[in-house]
Image (spheres, rainbow, N blue to C red):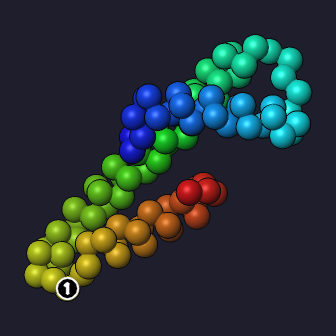
Amino acid sequence: MRLKKERIVTLARILIDQLIEQHLIRPEAPKAELAASLEQIITDELTIEDRLDAEVRQILDTYKAQIETGQVDERKMFLMIKKQLAKEREMIL
């Protein structure tokens, strides 16, 4: 996961506060409860992306020889594979 737990907590709290301040939501639960729910959603989404990245790395292993010889750019191939898998799974990154 690219974000530390503390950053996710802070991000969730800020988002909830801003949504309330801008009258985009009318909370029916305490702000702390809303923030905790949003933290979990963010964490879950980041975990899904982490799993996708791991799968892409596994696929990249099959191109190891081409990457080592410079025939394939590892970063470009990683992004291409990730984009394709996300598209096939109807994921928004």
Residue at 35 percent across and 76 percent down: it is 76
- 24 or 64, nearer to the observer: 24
User: How many marks are shown on the rendered structure?
Assistant: 1
- 89 or 34, nearer to the observer: 34
Q: Position of residue 58 (x, y in %)?
A: 28, 55
Q: Which residue is mark 1?
A: 71
**Residue 93 versus residue 35 in the image, above or below:** below
Which residue is farthest bottom?
Answer: 71
Which residue is farthest front?
Answer: 21
Q: Position of residue 60 (x, y in %)?
A: 27, 64
- 44 or 29, nearer to the observer: 29
Residue at 23 percent across and 66 percent down: it is 62
**Residue 63 versus residue 31 in the image, above or below:** below
Is residue 65 visible to the viewer in this orientation of the structure? yes
Q: Position of residue 70 (x, y in %)?
A: 15, 83
Find numbered disc 1 in the image and state the secondary structure of the residue it sits on.
Answer: loop
**Residue 50 versus residue 19 in the image, above or below:** below
The amino acid marked with disc number 1 is Gln
Q: Quadrant of the C terminus?
A: bottom right
Q: Position of residue 46 (x, y in %)?
A: 49, 41
Tag 1: Cα neighbours inside 10 Å, few (<14), some, or many (≥20)? Answer: few
Is residue 41 visible to the viewer in this orientation of the structure? no
**Residue 52 versus residue 45 in the image, above or below:** below
Image quadrant assignment for residue 80 = bottom left
- 82 or 58, nearer to the observer: 82
Residue at 72 percent across and 19 percent down: it is 31
Q: Quadrant of the N terminus?
A: top left
Residue at 57 percent across and 36 percent down: it is 11
